[in-house]
Image (cartoon, rainbow, N blue to C red):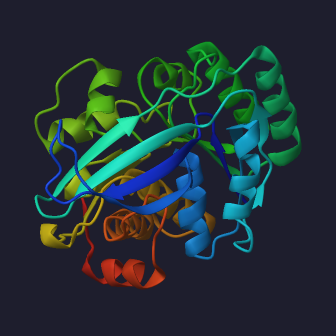
Amino acid sequence: MITTITLNTALDRTIEVPDFKIGDVTSGAIIAEQPAGKGINVSRCLAAYGTENALTGFVGSLEVPLYHDSFRGTGVQTLLVPVEGRTRFDTTILDPRNGTETHIREKGFHVTETGLRKLEAVLARMVDPDEIVALCGSMPPGVSPEAFAGIVKQCIDKPARVLVDTSGEPLRAAVALRPYAIKPNVDELQDLVGMELSDRFEILEAALSLTPGIQVVLVSLGKNGALLIKEGSAWRAACPLDQGKVVNTVGCGDALVAGFLAGLEKKLTDEETARLAVAFGTAAALTPTAGDIRMGDIEEMLKQTTVEKMS
């Protein structure tokens, strides 16, 4: 079983505005509005692929029904922790004429110590030994790096295979606990190792330096695919995509994580898992909203994804 944890959930709103210009009064159309957040997006992608999973995290008390309704009939188990305050909006403005994306991120609700204790109680019931747990996204106000580390440790101690996808101090705090896997992008990896990484070989060396304590480092390379480093071996997977077909890149990293988790759940080889992860991430760029992914697109991207062993 796979469980995703999203501490800083959001309501994603995607608006299409041709010839969008800052400072102008213009017309647009709402393409989608749905519950989101990085782990929520991962769960949605897994459900589209037919992989059973469960999700939890903090949600503004008034928005809890929206999250439950959003996953009704998908097979995803939802056990959310209501908190006071409104769930933040993440707004994406797509300009199809100029091929641009503009992202506006709100700050969100404040999580109290009581909220953290409630989440601990939920995780004690949800997370079973040997399952896969993904903690994804930024920290809401009130959740310190130390508090986040406590959540990671609770899952590791089950023991569960824990993947962490966050950044900055929370990521460093999690890495110190040696989770099963992390999913940094290049900027986050540079921050972790404290040096600039100018090419994929430096990126590989930096990721390998983390693997004595962490079994898997999955590095997102954006449109250039991803590196999967595990126990001294490394695979680079890439899926060339005509940039004219790209609809929206928000959530592609979440889809990459979902593909990786699906590969783990299916007990695929490292090479097959890298291929599936990148196929997921690329397929996500073909839809306008984060977390929406089509099986047909995944299958097509799998055919086009190449994998090479780097070490």
Residue closest to the eye, 193 or 79 = 79
Specify the quadrant of the image occupied by residue 196: top left
Q: Is residue 170 above or below residue 275?
A: above
Specify the quadrant of the image occupied by residue 152: top right
Residue closest to the eye, 294 or 182 = 294
Q: Where is residue 237 in the image (x, y as percent from the top left)?
A: 28, 63
Q: Quadrant of the N terminus?
A: bottom right
Q: Where is residue 30 in the image (x, y as percent from the top left)?
A: 40, 60
| Residue farthest to the front, as pictured | 25
Q: Is residue 206 visible?
A: yes
Residue at 74% x, 71% y: name it: 75
Q: Can residue 234 be seen in this view?
A: no
Specify the quadrant of the image occupied by residue 289: bottom left
Residue at 45% x, 71% y: name it: 293
Residue closest to the eye, 177 or 134 = 134
Q: In this view, does 22 lie to the left or right of 141?
A: left
Q: Is residue 69 left or right of residue 279?
A: right
Residue at 63% x, 22% y: name it: 149
Residue closest to the eye, 171 or 161 = 171
Q: In this view, does 94 lie above or below 191?
A: below
Q: Position of residue 131 (x, y in %)?
A: 73, 53
Residue at 42% x, 85% y: name it: 296
Q: Position of residue 203 (x, y in %)?
A: 22, 38
